[in-house]
Amino acid sequence: MWGRLWPFLLSILIATAVPGPSLRRPSRELDATPRMTIPYEELSGTRHFAGQAQNYSTLLLEEASARLLVGARGALFSLSANDIGDGAHKEIHWEASPEMQSKCHQKGKNNQTECFNHVRFLQRLNSTHLYACGTHAFQPLCAAIDAEAFTLPTSFEEGKEKCPYDPARGFTGLIIDGGLYTATRYEFRSIPDIRRSRHPHSLRTEETPMHWLNDAEFVFSVLVRESKASAVGDDDKVYYFFTERATEEGSGSFTQSRSSHRVARVARVCKGDLGGKKILQKKWTSFLKARLICHIPLYETLRGVCSLDAETSSRTHFYAAFTLSTQWKTLEASAICRYDLAEIQAVFAGPYMEYQDGSRRWGRYEGGVPEPRPGSCITDSLRSQGYNSSQDLPSLVLDFVKLHPLMARPVVPTRGRPLLLKRNVRYTHLTGTPVTTPAGPTYDLLFLGTADGWIHKAVVLGSGMHIIEETQVFREPQSVENLVISLMQHSLYVGAPSGVIQLPLSSCSRYRSCYDCILARDPYCGWDPGTHACMAATTIANRSQGSRTALIQDIERGNRGCESSRDTGPPPPLKTRSVLRGDDVLLPCDQPSNLARALWLLNGSMGLSDGQGGYRVGVDGLLVTDAQPEHSGNYGCYAEENGLRTLLASYSLVVRPATPAPAPKAPDTPGAQLAPDVRLLYVLAIAALGGLCLILASSLLYVACLREGRRGRRRKYSLGRASRAGGSAVQLQTVSGQCPGEEDEGDEEEGLGPGGQLSPDHPWGGSPSPTTPTAPTATS
Ligand SMILES: *[C@@H]1O[C@H](CO)[C@@H](O)[C@H](O)[C@H]1NC(C)=O
Ligand SMILES: *[C@@H]1O[C@H](CO)[C@@H](O)[C@H](O)[C@H]1NC(C)=O
Ligand SMILES: *[C@@H]1O[C@H](CO)[C@@H](O)[C@H](O)[C@H]1NC(C)=O
Ligand SMILES: *[C@@H]1O[C@H](CO)[C@@H](O)[C@H](O)[C@H]1NC(C)=O
Ligand SMILES: *[C@@H]1O[C@H](CO)[C@@H](O)[C@H](O)[C@H]1NC(C)=O
Ligand SMILES: *[C@@H]1O[C@H](CO)[C@@H](O)[C@H](O)[C@H]1NC(C)=O
């Protein structure tokens, strides 16, 4: 164990030397439990599409025509965005020929996965055509497709400089003003590259004397319209997010480092870049990159990035999902960080790094910086100095650009720390949208896809993230490959190996009471006292001013506003249970919210604690063991969440004195007349039968557990720690139905969990904190 730990303790020491935010953050307080769990069987309002193809990884939403275009393995689909499952889709079959496939197989590629035409690129080219590229059995091809007719053209374009060969290779691409901006490792050169093609000035990244990119695995790119409303006549810029080998860490040669440490990066180029005239000819003259820090050294593998407000650069920000660095391959944990464009811009305007030949390592460049500033776009002030384009830039500047692609300062997340550190989850993709609430404030709503086919819907609050719900969208565990939001359809589209799923962005009617509606903290939902219903806030917003202000929402705290409302929902019916003295009785009570704590009251006042007076309090109800007449009374099961208490179930329990057992009329029973040894035989036979039943029952339970575990069972969370923090003696445990060897999330011990799962409380994860972000406050 310690032998395995040392490298990581060492890497912390190295990491602390890197300028950056404080690493000493408690991680447990940044974990969040999804409030609701919606397993596949309980999905509602979803639509599904799957053709004959597999790997529905490329999605393109066209809001204007209400079409969702899908690139899959061997096919393209045009679905109606309103209902992707309406059966009225168009399909293009586009597979590599059998000859191509066998040639691919002969080259040593896998004919089960790689030797197909995986569509990796699908974008709008112009008003009439789409542009698509596929790996085409390791011979990439591209095609301009008539969007209306939706058929393949008769001629194709060479794809090797636009599309990766390997379907699993990181890739990102955009079409901007007709030019293709793609970034990946193009197999024929095996060096990663950011390129522009189908453009009068084709450009790529530099490789001599140093590589600007090292084994880069691209995740995301976006155009930010920084020219819009720019006072200085700035250019639009394309930002790239990727993970690459860190050459600057440790000593290493100029172009090649022995370091295998991979770090996250953000890079950018100017849209108006035309390359240099003599130096950096047909290369970017504006390329700059910087390290992207979230929670180092643990979380450095970038999985997904999304941009919000990219149209208005003053508000543009990004969310990124990280998983553990590659040495932690077997552990599952994810981090989410937010970055402001302004911070990235500041880093690109700051000091550069330089490879210092003397010490043979990278360090901060302290010398003079030539003018115009290397890596900047052509602005009005440069134009006034006669620099009309990048081709007019002086050699001194271009020589500097060649050798200084990396900035000295890393990009740190907003507030200097992650928004979420989630154990036991591997996020694979994310997307988000700002939601303006009727009262005015805007909240970012994120949708996070996991490696096992779940979607987490979360709202970003100042302090962190609140996960509104987790939804299992695929029966068979599979990796969420793509997520797209349609505001017009109020839908989320999920692309995955087996098909595409369409989900509503919100289902407010799920919340039945005012309390339930505000506890959810969904910025799309608010309680309307007029109709006594939890409503989509967007429909309310179209109404008169009067009813807008009446809508009850409390996204910030999630517990205020319902005090004067009598909309607590219909009280649960009183159920009567009558049992015999000495019996065990379970009073079921299901807590719909994973953040709620069960509270049981007897006769309206006495709080019952687990393990005392014959009571067992569990997530599925109250178990009364060995019932006695004094157990009789009225039992109320409450959910305590965020300082609010709601009645979920009430029972009237009557314990009857045990009537004398049906008289053991000794003389009449034949057993009594049997010889003692025969009676012993009976007892033995009954014992053997009982034992057999026990074995059968437990193996059945085991099989059931195995199956449930595989199928993404309904996840139950225990708030053991939270209740401890709240000072209450109520301890949640499952009293029945707990599968052997299963651990409740919150009860996990420190360090590495039983399944090799990482608990953020281990020595390098920060100091432990017993509170969960939404620990219920004291209830009076
Ligand atoms: C892949 O190649 C193997 C061996 O050459 C062959 O047996 C198999 O049928 C091929 N599979 C496909 C799907 O072409
Ligand atoms: C769009 O691009 C395609 C392919 O390059 C071309 O054939 C078509 O004429 C273009 N359409 C318009 C309206 O420019
Ligand atoms: C830049 O453009 C201006 C006006 O179009 C022109 O007068 C000037 O000669 C150009 N400068 C260079 C270096 O090309
Ligand atoms: C395609 O889907 C299969 C499962 O159907 C999966 O195993 C494979 O990894 C996927 N390939 C890519 C490139 O996503
Ligand atoms: C609400 O207003 C928006 C634009 O303000 C409109 O697009 C939408 O259709 C309206 N929704 C309803 C339900 O009227
Ligand atoms: C609760 O009330 C019932 C009758 O309503 C009574 O018989 C019982 O003793 C009470 N239990 C306690 C613990 O007060």
Image (cartoon, rainbow, N blue to C red):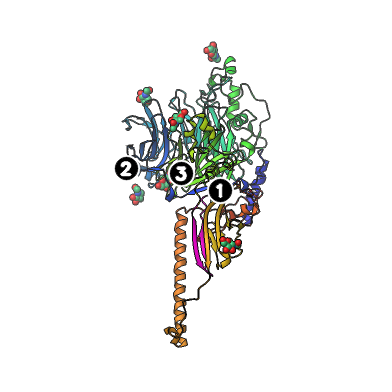
What residue is disc 2 on?
98
202, 440: nearer the viewer: 440
761, 614: nearer the viewer: 614
Q: Nearer the viewer, mark 3 or mark 1?
A: 1
Residue 517 lies, in percent from the top left, at 52, 43
Task: Give the spatial CA distance, label 3 vs label 1.
Answer: 20 Å
Image side of residue 534 versus residue 296, left or right: left
Does the magenta portion include 581?
Answer: yes
Choose the circle earlier in sequence order: 2 or 3.
Answer: 2
Q: Amino acid at mark 1?
A: Thr
Considering only vertical position in the picture, is 706 above or below 520?
A: below
Image side of residue 508 versus residue 17, left or right: left
Does the magenta portion include 272?
Answer: no
700, 571: nearer the viewer: 571
Circle 2/circle 3 CB separation < 8 Å: no
Considering only vertical position in the picture, is 663 above or below 440?
A: below
Q: In the picture, residue 637 is in which quadrant?
A: bottom right
Q: Which residues are magenta?
A: 572-595
Q: Amino acid at mark 3?
A: Val
Residue 503 lies, in percent from the top left, at 43, 41
Residue 269 lies, in percent from the top left, at 54, 28
What residue is disc 1 on?
33
Q: Secondary structure at mark 3?
A: loop
Q: Amino acid at mark 2?
A: Pro
Task: Give the spatial CA distance, label 2 vs label 3.
Answer: 29 Å
Considering only vertical position in the picture, is 381 above or below 299?
A: above
Choose the circle earlier in sequence order: 1 or 2.
Answer: 1
